[in-house]
Image (spheres, rainbow, N blue to C red):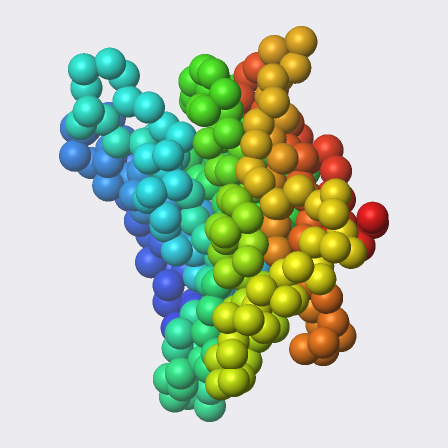
Amino acid sequence: MSFRSRSMSATRVRWQVTSLLLCHLCVGLNSGVAQECESAKLQSTISKMEQDLGSGQGPVRLHRVERLEESIFVPPTGDLGVDSPFHIYQVEQRRFVLADGKAVENVPAGSFSEYVALSSNGDHAYRFAGFPNSENDFRRLISDYHLPSPRGREQAQTRALYCAQVVFGIEPKEWILGEGEARMRVAEQFVDPSAANPFAEAERRWKNFRREYPRVNVVLKTDIGEDGTYLTHLPVFVAAVEGPHSPPEIRELKIQVKQDGSCHLLTDTSSQHK
């Protein structure tokens, strides 16, 4: 790390420490000051987590994804103006990094399938996909904020898909929700658009795959058990790494949604098992 980088980091830490000290002195004066204190504590927690993650993954930042909060937090009845008491973040590489004292664009700069949640005051942290014990931390989030449990098959399936991404790190681009989507994924991955007849080639590859692996499920479905839990079968597409002529692989994730709304990954079944 350059002298300038160390200097900037030290300055940021000193500012955060000063802000937190002022908060402790001023807390209780008025609600505006209290909100500023919570914001300062949250920013301090974010910076600390980014530094900890950066030691193993390079310069990263926590990018807040509000739609993931809105998908699971339900405001009290009749009070839609209530903000989520927790924030959900995705870990991303920083677009610009300091090198030899200069800002340099980090290419490629992308996102990781890693998610964390922080309480709005920065006091509590929950680590999900990409970290150990993600299921336990998600269960703790549900308990701490009294998040409602899914009611019925449709809500349970929605929760399972939420957990697939946030808790288990399986992004929506990998999901297969039906045979039409499975065909499209196979065509995108294995058929050359410049071929004489790409549609015929896509159909041929798909028929060969189904003939070889007839038992592979390519349809999203959710079953309900006698104990009141739900089991969602989520097919996911895995691109072949051996080469363009290798068969596609479709795995089936079985995600159990429990009565408290938490999730448990039961199995990961590969299409290579006939």
* 174 with respect to 69 (left or right): right
- Residue 123 location (% of width, % of height): 45, 35
- Residue 173 location (% of width, % of height): 49, 56
- Residue 177 location (% of width, % of height): 51, 44
At a point 66% along the width and 59% down the height, the residue shown is 207
At a point 39% along the width and 77% down the height, the residue shown is 96
Decide: is 3 above or below 125: below
200, 227: nearer the viewer = 200
Quadrant including the N terminus: bottom right
- Residue 113 location (% of width, % of height): 55, 55
216, 176: nearer the viewer = 216
* 22 with respect to 213 (left or right): left
At a point 33% along the width and 35% down the height, the residue shown is 70
260, 176: nearer the viewer = 176
206, 238: nearer the viewer = 206
Does residue 4 appear in this view? no
Decide: is 201 above or below 33: below
* 93 with respect to 209 (left or right): left
* 156 with respect to 211 (left or right): left
Q: Quadrant of residue 230?
A: top right
Does residue 27 appear in this view? yes
Decide: is 7 above or below 57: below
User: Residue lying furthest right in this view?
Assistant: 273
At a point 43% along the width and 70% down the height, the residue shown is 94
